[in-house]
Image: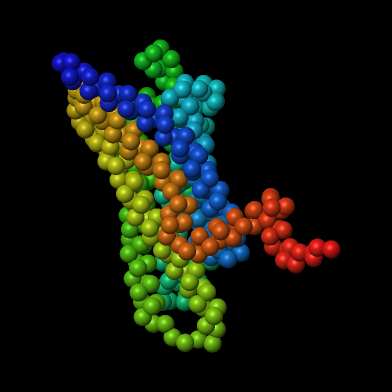
Amino acid sequence: MSNSIYDLILSIYFVTIRISQITPPFHLTFGTFGNVLNIILFTRPNLRTNPCSIYFIASSINNILFMYLFELINYLSSIWDVYILPKSNFWCKLDIIIGYLPFSLILWFPVLASIDRFLSSSRNIQVRHLSSLKIARRVIVAIYIVFLLLLLHLFIYYELVPTSNNGFDCGVSSEEYFVFFNFFVPILCCILPILLMCIFGILILCNVRSVIARIVPHADNARNDHIRSNDRHMAKMLLFQILITVIMSLPYIGTTMFYTLAVVKYKYDLSLLQSMIYTCANVIAGLLYYTNSVTGFYIYTMTSSKFRKEMKHCIRLGLIKYFPMRIRPTLTNTNPAQPQ
């Protein structure tokens, strides 16, 4: 191996390490801030009556669970060798279940929101009635139960396995299950929800155009305009989120499928340089996919004036509550006493 190749391999290795060390803290910082604000804003009276807001709230809660139960634990153990949970088969199985459950649902809440927007924009009144707060709450509970059942095989196959440094780590010893798992996760967590998001995104656009074309006068125009305005803002936020989600998820699908098919299934032998390039690409693709749990608040802020209005209102209320001596005099002291 020439010195130039060796230097290139070292450079890629150190870049990979630095990216792995730096990116997760940014995810945790900006993700926690954004998702907490999402929960606060979507529970405000002007937004919480829309069923789509319930899915956005559930998505934000799930994102927080993912960041702290999956990304943070993996970051501490893989980068800094800090293990929060004891090393035993039971804790290995429990950790993998509670981590992969929110991981698997990152893209599914936007799917549920897009289905809700499709239903609410339908011309059929019976279909529109399926978009309701009651149904949204039931669907959220149901999807957690369904995915918990779908992931039960992790509890069976994951266990403590020997590592190259004579230690033990949580992993899979069965090669057949490893191949199945690396197909199962991308299909269930990425490919299927992305396809559904794209399909319902197109259907939403078709429905919105149809609604605009058939607007007629109504006795309760003010109320209808308010409802339609909320629906338009929700649909706009959701469509932009779908676009960003697809862009950030495709590299993860590609790297995972390449490794499963080329390396594991067909035993393609990577050179040291190829292996290092793949490792770097896989780390970047994984972190880019994890960014889906961070971007929601920032997408909504950029795409919806109504969302920005609610955020400004919350900030003003917060300033008045926590800094009353600085804010209230400017509001109340309009008639200063005359000098004697």
Q: Nearer the viewer, residue 159 or 7?
A: 7
Asked if residue 116 shows in the view, the reply is no
Q: Residue at x 37, y 67 (%)?
A: 204
Judged left or right of residue 328, residue 55 is left
* Residue 117 x, y percent position in the rendering: 44, 65
Q: Residue at x 75, y 67 (%)?
A: 335
Identify the image quadrant of residue 100. Answer: top left
* Residue 127 x, y percent position in the rendering: 45, 72
Identify the image quadrant of residue 232. Answer: bottom left
* Residue 42 x, y percent position in the rendering: 55, 58
Q: As drawn, which residue projects farthest toward the right? A: 340
- Asked if 160 appears above or below 151 in the picture, the reply is above
Judged left or right of residue 199, residue 45 is right
Q: Nearer the viewer, residue 98 or 67?
A: 67
Judged left or right of residue 182, residue 148 is right
Q: Residue at x 69, y 53 (%)?
A: 326
Q: Residue at x 29, y 29 (%)?
A: 279
